[in-house]
Amino acid sequence: MSDDQFDAIVVGAGCAGAVAAYRLASAGCSVLVVERGNYAGAKNMTGGRIYTHSLARVFPDFEGSAPLQRRITHEKISMAAPDALFTMDFTADELRESGKDSYAVLRGPFDQWLAERAEEAGADFIYGIAVEDLIVRDGRVCGVVAGGDEVEARITVLADGANSLLAQKAGLADDVPLPCQMAVGVKETIALPPSVIEDRFLCAPGEGAAWMFAGDCTKGRVGGGFLYTNDDSISLGLVATLSDLAAGDVPIYQMLEDFKQRADIAPLVKGGELVEYSGHLVPEGGLAMVPRLYGDGVLVCGDAAMLCMNLGYSVRGMDFAVSSGDLAADAVMRALEADDVSAAQLAAYEQLLDGCYVLQDLKRFRRFPRYMEETTRIFNEYPAMARDIMLNLFKVDGHPQARIKNKLLGPLKRVGLWRVAQDGRKGMKAL
């Protein structure tokens, strides 16, 4: 490694790190990206999807060059009982409009594309080396220790993923996250011909579905399932909190296998070939997990800043990562221009995040993670209630039909009308 001082060192070549490096290098800054994986995306996993509004700001030409998968035009949400699946399916022309659309993504090729754009702009990349420590002098981060070498920079951008040890070493993250705030995500990528995917999910060529599940997929515990359609594969996986996994007796890999064997899921993956199995830690605590975002000579962005939001019907992290990397670069450029890398100057980064959707959304929905943790009926009693209501409505067995209100009230009373009302009221307040 070079002994020269860089304008910026970026730790991690995920969405946030690569975007920050691209923006800085494009502005003429000297940038070094240190990635512990053997290539960009080697350590990343997502279901997953990216909302394009964030990409369009950084790469106006992304649609013609980024390795995106299918445009998501079908939004599906399911409550899974052990023997039934209640699903809402939504599609609209507006989901196809530029700036309002989203795409399924495979992080390996996508992260490599981001890194290539940053390299083309002039950023230097070093792969296969972990950053072991930070160089700190008089309370200011001055660079990193990687592979036994010290490399200095005027500003260090930490984008090293969830539960960042470097953010803790920089004094930005004080506490280890609670088990209920972190989740384990596991995913299988299952190859299928494009025409089969289109037939099974009722999608046009180039279009696909995003599908969220809650209930029996995680054995009634806090978490959920996901399914995304790629060009020639399906991403199928589960996410469950560490606290609930520890309290249960079924490991998450077995949950995923059982989920895949369900009568309503097995036909969707029938004949597919497993081409990848991956796992990853996922921040699930919302705003309560976000550390201090800046210090003397240092910023933190992406998953390292715990910028992730799960609302049950949608999971967002990649657009937060892209935007945080973009705005981190803005703050770094301002600091370099002012020749001031103090925390007081770098506080502009948090102000930029606060002025856009990232922190505004996290603040608006800050109560929802606790609501999901406390309202466990969402994952067991309510899927069973939905099954019973639907059976009452659709089952015809030769017996006289009850009135509709009785078909609805029976399952509601079994859970408890007061409980349902209370959970609904709390949910609306959280949302």
Image (cartoon, rainbow, N blue to C red):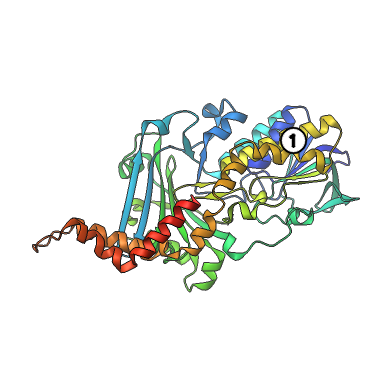
In the rendered view, would you say 50 is above or below 135? above
Q: Which percent across, then down, holds residue 73?
A: 39, 37
Residue wearing tag 1: 331
- SS for dot 1: helix
Quadrant of the drawing holding the N terminus:
top right
Name the side, left or right, on which 5 lies relative to 45: right
> Which residue is pictured at 30% across the width and 63% down the height?
412
Q: Looking at this view, is 18 or 393 the one in front?
A: 393
Name the side, left or right, on which 22 lies relative to 418: right
> Which residue is pictured at 51% across the width and 37% down the height?
51
Kindly give the residue lying farthest to the right in the view shown.
138
> Which residue is pictured at 34% across the width and 53% down the height?
270
Quarter of image, res 59: top right
Q: Which percent across, then down, holds residue 348?
A: 74, 37
Q: Residues within 10 Å of mark 1 (few under 14, many from 20)?
A: many
Would you say residue 263 is visible in this rendering? no
Q: Looking at this view, is 281 or 313 the one in front?
A: 313
> Which residue is pictured at 45% across the width and 51% down the height?
428
Q: Identify which amino acid the numbered label 1 is placed on.
A: Ala
Q: Which percent across, then down, holds residue 129?
A: 74, 50
